[in-house]
Amino acid sequence: MSTPLLGPVLLALWQHGPLPEHELLVLLPDATSAQVTPALTTLIEEGLIESCPDRHGTLYGPAVLCDETIAQQAYARYTGSPRCSGCGCTDTWPCPDGCWWVTPDRCSSCAGRGLVA
Ligand SMILES: [Zn+2]
Ligand SMILES: [Zn+2]
């Protein structure tokens, strides 16, 4: 079963979460609830997002124990986007302080740190 929404759902929740599922659907106008629900389940199983009960329903947001770099790398893997070989950021999910491409596979945040990972 393919879940093409893993990348977009992950990004939306890290940038805008915690959100209830119906607000997530507003952010992803091409997605249906039937597609988003299994994507949420997969992302929770992967430890990238977490759900928390709220008096208005269930909210989904970034997993507290998950490093943003891990989520960025998962996003690159799900979407197949070109990513930085140092940190895993992509055009759609740059480093927290912003970055640009110094070489085709290394962003400005990583270029200054030298090439040893
Ligand atoms: Zn980088
Ligand atoms: Zn970067």
Image (cartoon, helix red, strand yellow):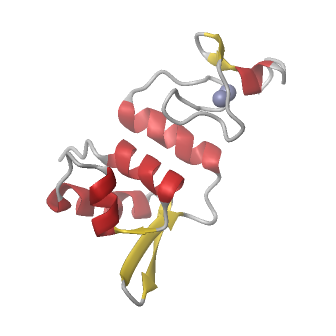
Q: Quadrant of ligand 1?
A: top right
Q: Residue 13 is drawn in which quadrant? A: bottom left
Image side of residue 98 versus residue 48, left or right: right
Q: Is residue 31 left or right of residue 24?
A: left
Residue farthest right in this picture: 113
Residue 84, horizontal then vertical, whole percent: 60, 24
Residue at (17, 47) in percent of width and height: 1
Residue 40, x across and y down, in percent: 34, 61
Q: Residue furthest bottom?
A: 55
Q: Left of 28 or right of it: where is 50?
A: right
Q: In the image, what residue occupies the spot 24% across and 46% down?
A: 3
Please tell me whether residue 9 is drawn above or below residue 111 in the rendered image: below
Query: Which residue is at the front of the view, 27 or 38?
Result: 27
Q: Report which quarter residue 108 is drawn in.
A: top right
Q: Residue furthest top?
A: 103
Task: Between residue 103 and residue 74, name the one nearer to us.
Answer: 103
Position of the C terminus, as image quadrant, is top right
Position of 88 compared to 32: left or right?
Answer: right
> Count of labels shown?
0
Q: In percent of the image, x 49 and y 57: which residue is there? A: 16
Q: Viewer-proximal residue, 9 or 65? A: 9
Percent position (x, y) of residue 111? 77, 18
Q: Which residue sits at x=23%, y=49%? A: 29
Query: Would you place residue 10 above or below residue 62 in this image?
Result: above
